[in-house]
């Protein structure tokens, strides 16, 4: 256990330093560490994507991608050495004292959000509403499974055709790290990758704030950029607390609590901000081709994280293009900008409307508009128009165009077409809302500088925002963290219990599930084949719901979890289709001749090698049909077909 923690810590320290140095080598100029980190990560992720996507389409063995990742790391190292030798570039030049002075907020805010991860065991046990049953299991089993096609990682079977996940490479990338390090995937993802994404996000916000402040006409201190980070803990506070109090109502807010490691979380938080950076750094003197290359890199990276990025790329990218052309190329640029907007609207009229997505997104917009955090942001946004700053006009136009492209009928038809599903449209709106909040927190500093408020007072103001934000994050979970499902009545959380559960389950997954998975994997190795198992779909652990059937393959890649078919039903095995847990549940709840016969009929054509039950009384009937007792793991009894 200690070894896993040390290895993960060492890996992310080395990885972060590598990205900073790599970004410095790419930028070639004396840039901030935040800018170098984000630049290095984007180019690195772009390389991973252009390697991983074709390999997934070709469905090559996993080891091929693993070797390519090794070559990529070597290539990055050689590039850094080349730049140092032939371009006289310092690998990483900075003063530690100065760096800490200008960036301490990143570490304070980051530490608070990472600390809060220690309380979220109920969300982890639930598995982000079972989504983890796919994503974490995929990361854990990719080295032993096909990397392409339409493989059902939660169950362990192949399905026909392809799916949109074929272009997502973050799971493939993470699988290499987990396999090479030999660490527990749940620990690596739920704690360390979440912490890394928090760190990246804080650095991106700081970088955006630096660019905005640097472009102001008024005299301003770019070192103040870090203080805008104080609002982030409130944005990432417990989602039921935010929604029930009406502070901030956005779709799938739990992603920022227990699912920060997911590609969808990266897309929601980073997407609009990254296109905002391109817009801020673009001007008439720059090569337009260079800006297009930046947009392509960002788009590929976002798609490689999650396909929910498509509508975000469309609205944010097109809006940024319209604004950039209008502001930077005088009359000719305005004509092209107007033509681009006209073509976009015309296509929207031609493309059919999606009533379902439109209703869902409209409801999400209304809920967000009525959020308490949005009211002051709207006021700040309106005031910002009176500050006579071109950079603010540019950003505000970007925001307004995105809102129009999502909310205005006809204009939003392309957005709806790209969203495909209701929840994707809702998540895209959430991305715009997060972007809107961050910009307005930056605007607070500009407004205060415009009225000649001293930086000392500004620091105090932002400090109070940060203290209030962190306090609400902690108090909000304490009051609302006892319930994980938003439709249930809110309950207070037992903070000591939450910490105790994680302390006794240090891999950020129930130890009983890990032990059961290892035992089933051992059985599969003894049989020298993949084994079909039937087991409880969901169990109650530590007072909360845990979906065992969709989680067990994370720790047992050589089993086929038939009980996960109800949640992830994609399979080309015709005999598996239509299987439900009802007969199994009836048997384990009340084992008798009748209930066992019903179960037996349901599984007779499924070649079930192993049945896992929690009721010891089930053994009497299982023995009659060729099953023998194999092992007990906690409350689970494993019965193996002779």
Image: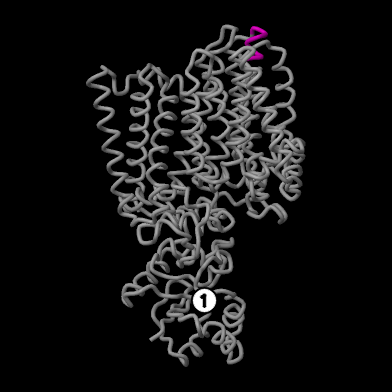
Q: Residue furthest left?
A: 85
Classify residue 96 as left or right of residue 211. Answer: left
Q: Where on the picture, by quarter, is residue 428?
A: top right
| x then y, percent, for residue 351 | 70, 43
Predominant secondary structure, magenta span: helix
| x then y, percent, for residue 103 | 46, 23
Tag 1 residue: 614
Q: Is residue 202 above or below residue 90?
A: below
Q: Quadrant of the C terminus?
A: bottom left
Report if residue 230 is visible in the image: yes
State the residue at coordinates (51%, 50%): 499
Q: Residues within 10 Å of mark 1 (few under 14, many from 20)?
A: some
Classify residue 2 as left or right of residue 126. Answer: left
State the residue at coordinates (76%, 47%): 359
Judge by depth and name the residue closer to the eye, 394 or 507.
394
Judge by depth and name the residue closer to the eye, 266 or 341.
341
How many marks the image carries: the answer is 1
| x then y, percent, for residue 265 | 55, 43
Q: Where on the picture, by quarter, is residue 641?
A: bottom left
Q: Is residue 413 above or below residue 17?
A: below
In the image, which residues are magenta? 446-452
**Mark 1 element type:** loop
Report if residue 477 is visible in the image: no
| x then y, percent, for residue 15 | 35, 37
Classify residue 336 as left or right of residue 353. Answer: left
Q: Is residue 12 above or below residue 532?
A: above
């Amino acid at each position: 256990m200690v070894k896993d923690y040390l290895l993960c810590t060492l890996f992310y320290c080395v990885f972060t330093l590598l990205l900073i140095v790599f970004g410095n080598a790419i930028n070639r100029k004396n840039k901030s560490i935040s800018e170098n980190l984000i630049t290095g990560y984007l180019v690195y992720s772009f390389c991973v994507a252009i390697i991983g996507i074709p390999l997934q389409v070709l469905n090559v063995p996993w080891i091929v991608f693993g070797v390519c990742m090794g070559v990529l790391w070597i290539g990055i190292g050689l590039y850094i050495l080349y730049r140092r030798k032939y371009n006289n570039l310092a690998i990483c030049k900075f003063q530690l004292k100065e760096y800490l002075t200008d960036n301490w907020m990143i570490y304070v805010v980051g530490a608070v959000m990472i600390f809060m991860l220690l309380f979220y065991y109920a969300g982890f046990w639930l598995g982000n509403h079972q989504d983890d049953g796919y994503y974490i299991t995929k990361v854990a089993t990719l080295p032993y499974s096909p990397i392409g096609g339409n493989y059902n990682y939660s169950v362990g079977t192949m399905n026909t055709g392809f799916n949109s996940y074929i272009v997502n490479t973050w799971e493939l990338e993470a699988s290499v790290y987990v396999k090479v390090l030999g660490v527990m995937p749940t620990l690596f993802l739920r704690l360390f990758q979440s912490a890394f994404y928090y760190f990246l996000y804080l650095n991106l916000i700081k970088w955006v704030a630096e660019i905005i402040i640097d472009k102001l006409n008024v005299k301003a201190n770019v070192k103040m950029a870090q203080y805008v980070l104080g609002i982030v803990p409130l944005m990432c506070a417990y989602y039921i607390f935010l929604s029930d109090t009406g502070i901030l109502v956005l779709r799938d807010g739990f992603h920022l609590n227990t699912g920060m490691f997911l590609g969808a979380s990266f897309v929601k938080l980073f997407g609009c901000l990254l296109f905002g950076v391109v817009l801020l750094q673009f001007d008439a003197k720059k090569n337009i081709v260079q800006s297009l290359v930046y947009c392509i890199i960002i788009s590929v990276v976002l798609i490689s994280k999650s396909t929910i990025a498509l509508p975000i790329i469309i609205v944010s990218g097109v809006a940024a293009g319209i604004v950039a052309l209008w502001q930077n190329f005088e009359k000719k640029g305005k004509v092209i900008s107007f033509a681009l907007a006209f073509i976009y609207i015309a296509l929207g009229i031609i493309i059919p409307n999606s009533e379902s997505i439109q209703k869902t997104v409209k409801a999400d917009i209304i809920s967000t508009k009525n959020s308490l955090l949005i009211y002051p942001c709207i006021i700040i946004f309106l005031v910002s128009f009176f500050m006579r700053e071109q950079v603010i006009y540019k950003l505000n136009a970007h925001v307004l165009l995105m809102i129009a492209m999502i909310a205005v009928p006809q204009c939003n038809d392309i957005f709806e077409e790209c969203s495909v599903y209701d929840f994707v449209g809702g998540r895209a709106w959430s991305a715009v809302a997060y972007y809107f909040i961050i910009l307005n927190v930056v605007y607070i500093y500009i407004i205060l500088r415009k009225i000649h408020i001293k930086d000392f007072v500004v620091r105090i103001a932002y400090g109070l925002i940060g203290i209030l934000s962190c306090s609400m994050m902690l108090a909000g979970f304490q009051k609302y963290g006892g319930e994980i499902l938003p439709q249930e009545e809110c309950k207070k959380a037992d903070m000591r219990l939450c910490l105790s559960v994680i302390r006794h389950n240090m891999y950020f997954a129930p130890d009983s599930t890990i032990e059961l998975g290892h035992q089933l994997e051992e059985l599969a190795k003894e049989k020298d084949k993949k084994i079909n198992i039937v087991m409880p779909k969901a169990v109650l652990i530590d007072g909360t719901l845990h979906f065992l059937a969709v989680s067990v393959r994370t720790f047992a890649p050589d089993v086929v979890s038939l009980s996960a078919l109800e949640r992830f039903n994609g399979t080309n095995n015709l005999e598996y289709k239509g299987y439900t847990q009802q007969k199994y549940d009836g048997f384990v709840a009340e084992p008798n001749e009748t209930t066992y016969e019903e179960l037996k009929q349901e599984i007779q054509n499924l070649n079930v090698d192993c049945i896992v039950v929690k009721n010891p009384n089930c053994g009497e009937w299982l023995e009659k049909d060729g099953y023998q007792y194999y092992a007990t793991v906690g409350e689970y009894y494993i019965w193996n077909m002779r």
